Image (tube, rainbow, N blue to C red):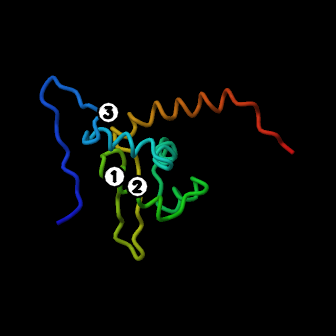
């Protein structure tokens, strides 16, 4: 048996209850807002990246945490993964339409924060 999660669809006209611990939408929110999830989505906002390019673009993330974060975001349908059958395999990641849609407000938030901060000291 695999550890896959079965996503429940709400009844027509009903919304997910994200405050309920069993809500599948809550899992997606948790993955997006996790320590590294937001940085993966922002890093992939303008172009697709290979695993090591993505790791290098996010300072401080370990390969293990990047792999776990990507696995969750791929499972949630926010990120796509393409493996090229080379030796060694080259794996490229990018945002799905859903990932682009979710990433836009995160990018906007990031841009607003960085525009409001004082300029960095150039010592």
Q: Across the whole image, how many numbered discs are drawn on residues?
A: 3
**Distance from the alpha carbon under mark 3 to that under mark 1:** 23 Å
Which residue position is annotated with label 3?
Answer: 19
Quadrant in the picture for residue 122: top right
Tell me which numbered mark, 3 or 1, is placed earlier along the sequence. 3
Q: Which mark is residue 70?
A: 2
Left or right, residue 54 beside residue 11: right
Which residue position is annotated with label 1?
Answer: 74
Q: What residue is drawn where x is 25% and y is 39%?
A: 23
Q: Residues within 10 Å of mark 3 (few under 14, many from 20)?
A: few
Tell me which numbered mark, 2 or 3, is placed earlier along the sequence. 3
Vertical side of 46 occupied by 49: above or below = below
Please state which of the two labelled residues, at mark 3 or mark 1, is closer to the viewer.
Answer: 3
Please state which of the two labelled residues, at mark 2 or mark 3, is closer to the viewer.
Answer: 3
Closer-to-camera residue (76/93): 76
**Distance from the alpha carbon under mark 2 to that under mark 1:** 6 Å
Quadrant in the picture for residue 121: top right
Vertical side of 61 occupied by 101: above or below = above
């Amino acid at each position: 048996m695999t550890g896959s999660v079965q996503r429940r669809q709400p009844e027509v006209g009903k919304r997910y209850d994200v405050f309920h611990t069993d809500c599948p939408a809550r899992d997606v929110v948790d993955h997006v807002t996790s320590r590294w999830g937001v940085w993966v989505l922002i890093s992939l906002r303008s172009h697709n990246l290979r695993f090591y390019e993505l790791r290098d673009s996010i300072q401080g993330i370990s390969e293990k945490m990047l792999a776990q974060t990507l696995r969750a975001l791929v499972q949630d349908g926010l990120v796509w993964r393409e493996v090229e059958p080379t030796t060694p395999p080259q794996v490229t990641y990018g945002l799905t339409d859903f990932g682009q849609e979710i990433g836009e407000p995160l990018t906007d938030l990031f841009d607003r924060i960085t525009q409001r901060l004082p300029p960095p000291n150039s010592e």
